[in-house]
Image (spheres, helix red, strand yellow):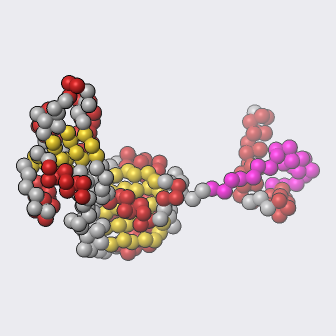
Amino acid sequence: MSPEKQGWGKVYFCPTPIGNLRDITLRVLDVLKEADCIACEDTRVTLKLLNAYQIRKPLLSYHAHNVPQATRDILRLVREGKVVAFVSDAGMPGIQDPGMELVLRLLEEGIPFEVLPGPSAFLLGVVYSGFAFSGFTFLGFLPREGKERRETLRRVLLLPQATVLYESPRRLLKTLGDIREIAGGERRVLVARELTKLHEEILRGTVAEVAEMLKGRDILGEVVIVVEGAPKRKEEVQVPRRLLELLRGRGLTQKDIVTLLSEGLGIEKNALKRQLSALEEAEDLGEG
């Protein structure tokens, strides 16, 4: 820390359990016990956790509707030499909650902070899915409606990496329908609900199968969706253009050429048809 900042306090971003209150690290408990103040989204939720571990600390409410004022309060406390623990209602603060705005402000002001490791629902979903051999893209919550929502889905569902997102139980079936429309009903998905809680549920199958499992049900709890990455297309064998021209020059039809090369060289018929069509288009353009 630079000399002018000596005597300042610090902000600790403390992940909290996503369901089971025992899923908290010893380091997080130490920080919560030693902090001068705990900033939290919902004081009622945080009090439940603190009471379970007999921790008594002043609470500062920090949520989407009071970010500017709450941020100023935190900055003032740190400059006074206080230690502030920052928690969200569940999981890693700064992921799909106002905590990221605080991170940006701390960076702007040059105020020291530390992020502690801990629970995060989307990581559990990724591991449960088994889809992440090529990595994954985490979207958080999609836009609720409109063109942006569909374009975002369309862009990531064409990638070989898995797609991970959070969804409201009210919109779960709609989102599965959108995924099915873009990626097809055979794309595999995992839907994880109420992770680490008493009624945890993990559903696996194709998009169509999982949607059918959920149809007509009263869906409750936070939801993680993991979508398998797009299948890799087979690399097409390119037949030399001169060979195609020679075969056509000998009077063979497209059907004859496709049959000959597919049987003789094992090249996929549709790939051959695409190459012949491209050759014809190039010749037409040349004549034009």
- The answer to whether residue 155 is above or below residue 132 is above
Residue at image location 7% in from the left, 55% down from the top: 56
Question: Which range of residues does the magenta coloring cover?
Answer: 233-254
| Residue depicted at x 30% and y 58% | 119
Q: Is residue 237 magenta?
A: yes
Residue 27 screen position, x and y as percent? 24, 54
Count of numbered circles in the view: 0
Question: Residue 118, located in which quarter of the rendered image?
Answer: bottom left
Q: Nearer the viewer, residue 209 or 133?
A: 133
- The correct choice, above or below, for 3 with respect to 99 in the image is above
User: From the viewer's perspective, is 63 left or right of 176?
Assistant: left
Asked whether, in this view, residue 74 is left or right of residue 145, the answer is left
Q: Whole-percent x and y of residue 97?
A: 25, 48
Compare residues 121 and 237 and report the one nearer the observer. Answer: 121
Report whether residue 14 is seen.
yes
Res 157 visible: no
**Residue ID at (20%, 39%):** 10
Image location (x, y in percent) of residue 239: 80, 49
| Quadrant in the picture for the N terminus | top left
Q: Is residue 153 magenta?
A: no
In this view, the residue in front, 162 or 208, is: 162
